[in-house]
C-alpha cells in the first residue's frame, strides 16, 4: 500500500472494538503545523486508507491513536500473510477471504483469534511504506526528517522517537461482558465462561482458571469428609480416623490428577491446540526423515544426543554430591542442635540463623544450576527449564524435609517437630518483612534464566 500525501479514504463497514493503540507525543500550542506533510496526520490518513477505523484521544502528554478493523480488512491482511487456519475438513490451509465459510471459527464465534488479529494489525500498520521513487520531507513539532522510498512509515517514526509505543488494548465491549458474566457473577460461584476467557486472554490464562475452578469444586470432598471426622465421635475407632483420612486424601489427589488430565485434554482438543501441535510435527517430520536418511547426519544427531545426556548426568551428579556433602550435614547439624537446645530463645535464634543461611545457600545452588545448564546440550527452552526445575527441586526438597524426617524417624519426637514448624512459621514471617525478597531465591534464579 503506497503513500498518498494528499490524503486517503477509510472503510465504512462496521468494525470490531478498538484493539490496538499507537502512542505519539501530544502537540503543543506553539508547535508549527506541518500541513499535509505532518507525519502524524499522514499516518492517520494512511491508516484510514488501509481500511482501519481511527479514533484519536488526547492525553496529558501523549496522544493515543486507537485502531479498529472491519472483518474484511483483517481478512485481506490474513490473505496477504498467507495465514494458515484450520478448515472444517481438518486441514490447515492458507486463509482466503473468498473461502471464509470453510474455515473453523473460534469458540466465541469470531473468525480470528486475538493472536491472529494482532498479527493482521501489525501487518497493516507496518506495511504503510513510501512507494514513490523520491524521498519525502516530513515534519513533526518543528522538526523535519527524510522519508526514503520503500521505507516503513511506522519504523521511521519509531527511529525518530515520534511513535513511542504500539500496544494491544482491552476490547471494552467484551471486557464488560466478561465482567458481568464472570467476575461480577456472584450467584454462581463455580461456573466460568471458559471459551470466552480463552478467546480473550489466551490458552494459559484460560487453563489456569479451569484448573482453579475444578480444584475448588473437588475440595468440597475432603472438606466435607474432614468436617464429618471432626464432628462425629467414633469412640474406640478414633485411632483409625487419622490413617483413614490420610488414605482418603492420597486417593483424592490421585483421582483429581487423572480427571484433570482428561479435562485438560478435552479442552485442548476443543480449542484446536492439538491440531496446531500435530501440524507443527507434520511439518517437522519430513525434514527430520531426510536428515535421518543421511548416515553422517544420523551419526552426528546420535552423538549430540548422547553428549547431551552425559552432560545432564554429570551436572545432576554435581548437584547430588553438593547436596550430600554440603547441605545434608548442615541440615542434620541444625536438627541435632535444635534437639539438645533447652532455651526457647536459643531455639528461636537458631531457627533464624538457619533460615537466613539456608536461603543464601539455596540462592547459590540456584545460580550454580543455571551455570551448569548453560553447558548442557538442551534442545530448546523447555528442556532447559525442566533441567533447572529438577536441580532446584532437589535443593528445596532437602531444606524442606530432611529436618522433618530426622525428628520423625530418628528421634521420633512429634512434640519437637510441632515446635519446629511453629517457630519456622513465626521466624519466616518476621524475617520476610526485614529481608524482603531474600526469602525467595528461586524467583531471582528464574529471572536470571529468562
Image: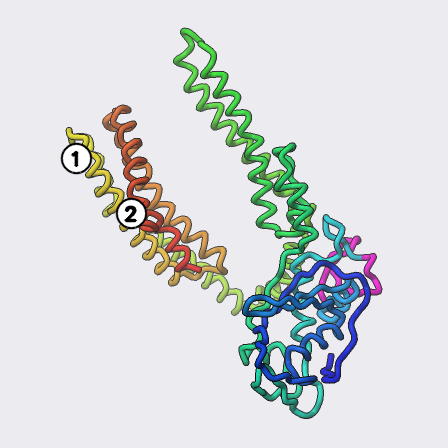
Horizontally, residue 254 falls left or right of residue 146, namely left
**Is 40 rendered above or below residue 308?**
below
- Residue 206 percent coordinates (x, y): 61, 46
Q: Residue furthest top?
A: 236
Camera-side residue of 232 and 24: 24
Q: Quadrant of residue 428?
A: top left
Q: Residue furthest front?
A: 29
Quick one: label 1 or label 2, which is nearer the N terminus? 1
- Residue 288 percent coordinates (x, y): 59, 63
Q: Which residue shows up at 38% across the image and 55% down it?
A: 445
The C terminus: image quadrant: bottom left
Horizontally, residue 234 falls left or right of residue 294, namely left
- Residue 413 percent coordinates (x, y): 25, 24
Residue 346: mark in rendering: 1
Element carrying mark 1? helix
Q: CA distance from mark 1 to mark 2?
A: 20 Å
Question: Which numbered disc, 1 or 2, marks the residue closer to the eye?
Answer: 2
The N terminus: image quadrant: bottom right
Residue 43: mark in rendering: none
Q: Quadrant of residue 208?
A: top right
Q: Which residue shows up at 62% across the image and 40% down it?
A: 184
The span picked out in magenta is 83-102
Camera-side residue of 55 and 440: 55
Q: Quadrant of residue 294?
A: bottom right
**Is 325 rendered above or below residue 407?**
below
Q: Residues within 10 Å of mark 2 (few under 14, many from 20)?
A: few
> Which residue corresponds to mark 2?
434
Q: Which residue shows up at 30% across the image and 31% down it?
A: 422
- Residue 99 percent coordinates (x, y): 83, 62
Instruction: Inspect this view and state whether residue 436 appears.
Output: yes
Amino acid at each position: 500500500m503506497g503513500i498518498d500525501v494528499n490524503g486517503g479514504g477509510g472503510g465504512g463497514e462496521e468494525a470490531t472494538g478498538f484493539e490496538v493503540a499507537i502512542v505519539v507525543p501530544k502537540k503543543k500550542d506553539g508547535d508549527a503545523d506541518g500541513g499535509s506533510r505532518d507525519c502524524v496526520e499522514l499516518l492517520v490518513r494512511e491508516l484510514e486508507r488501509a481500511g482501519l477505523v481511527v479514533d484519536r484521544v488526547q492525553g496529558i502528554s501523549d496522544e493515543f491513536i486507537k485502531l479498529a478493523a472491519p472483518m474484511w480488512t483483517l481478512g485481506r491482511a490474513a490473505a496477504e500473510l498467507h495465514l494458515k487456519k484450520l478448515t472444517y475438513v481438518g486441514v490447515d490451509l492458507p486463509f482466503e477471504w473468498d473461502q471464509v465459510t470453510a474455515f473453523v471459527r473460534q469458540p466465541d464465534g469470531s473468525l480470528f483469534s486475538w493472536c491472529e488479529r494482532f498479527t493482521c494489525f501489525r501487518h497493516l500498520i507496518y506495511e504503510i511504506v513510501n512507494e514513490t521513487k523520491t524521498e519525502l520531507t516530513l515534519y513533526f513539532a518543528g522538526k523535519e526528517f527524510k522519508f526514503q522510498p520503500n521505507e516503513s512509515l511506522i519504523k521511521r517514526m519509531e527511529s525518530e522517537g515520534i511513535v513511542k509505543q504500539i500496544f494491544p488494548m482491552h476490547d471494552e465491549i467484551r471486557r464488560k461482558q466478561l465482567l458481568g458474566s464472570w467476575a461480577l457473577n456472584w450467584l454462581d460461584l463455580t461456573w466460568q465462561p471458559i471459551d470466552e476467557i480463552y478467546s480473550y486472554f489466551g490458552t494459559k490464562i484460560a487453563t489456569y482458571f479451569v484448573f482453579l475452578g475444578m480444584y475448588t469444586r473437588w475440595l468440597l470432598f475432603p472438606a466435607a469428609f474432614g468436617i464429618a471426622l471432626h464432628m462425629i465421635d467414633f469412640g474406640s475407632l478414633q485411632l483409625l480416623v487419622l490413617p483413614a483420612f490420610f488414605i482418603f486424601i492420597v486417593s483424592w489427589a490421585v483421582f483429581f490428577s487423572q480427571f484433570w488430565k482428561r479435562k485438560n485434554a478435552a479442552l485442548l482438543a476443543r480449542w484446536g491446540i492439538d491440531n496446531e501441535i500435530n501440524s507443527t510435527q507434520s511439518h517437522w517430520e519430513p525434514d527430520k526423515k531426510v536428515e535421518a536418511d543421511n548416515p553422517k547426519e544420523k551419526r552426528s544427531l546420535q552423538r549430540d544426543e548422547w553428549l547431551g545426556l552425559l552432560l545432564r548426568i554429570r551436572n545432576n551428579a554435581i548437584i547430588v554430591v553438593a547436596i550430600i556433602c554440603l547441605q545434608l550435614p548442615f541440615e542434620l547439624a541444625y536438627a541435632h542442635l535444635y534437639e539438645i537446645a533447652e532455651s526457647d530463645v536459643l531455639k528461636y535464634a537458631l531457627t533464624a540463623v538457619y533460615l537466613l543461611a539456608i536461603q543464601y545457600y539455596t540462592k547459590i545452588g540456584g545460580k550454580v544450576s543455571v551455570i551448569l545448564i548453560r553447558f548442557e546440550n538442551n534442545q530448546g527452552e523447555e528442556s532447559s527449564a525442566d533441567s533447572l526445575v529438577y536441580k532446584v527441586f532437589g535443593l528445596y526438597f532437602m531444606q524442606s524435609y530432611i529436618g522433618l524426617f530426622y525428628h520423625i524417624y530418628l528421634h521420633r519426637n512429634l512434640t519437637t517437630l510441632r515446635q519446629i514448624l511453629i517457630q519456622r512459621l513465626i521466624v519466616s514471617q518476621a524475617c520476610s518483612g526485614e529481608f524482603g525478597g531474600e526469602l525467595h531465591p528461586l524467583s531471582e534464579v528464574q529471572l536470571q534464566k529468562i
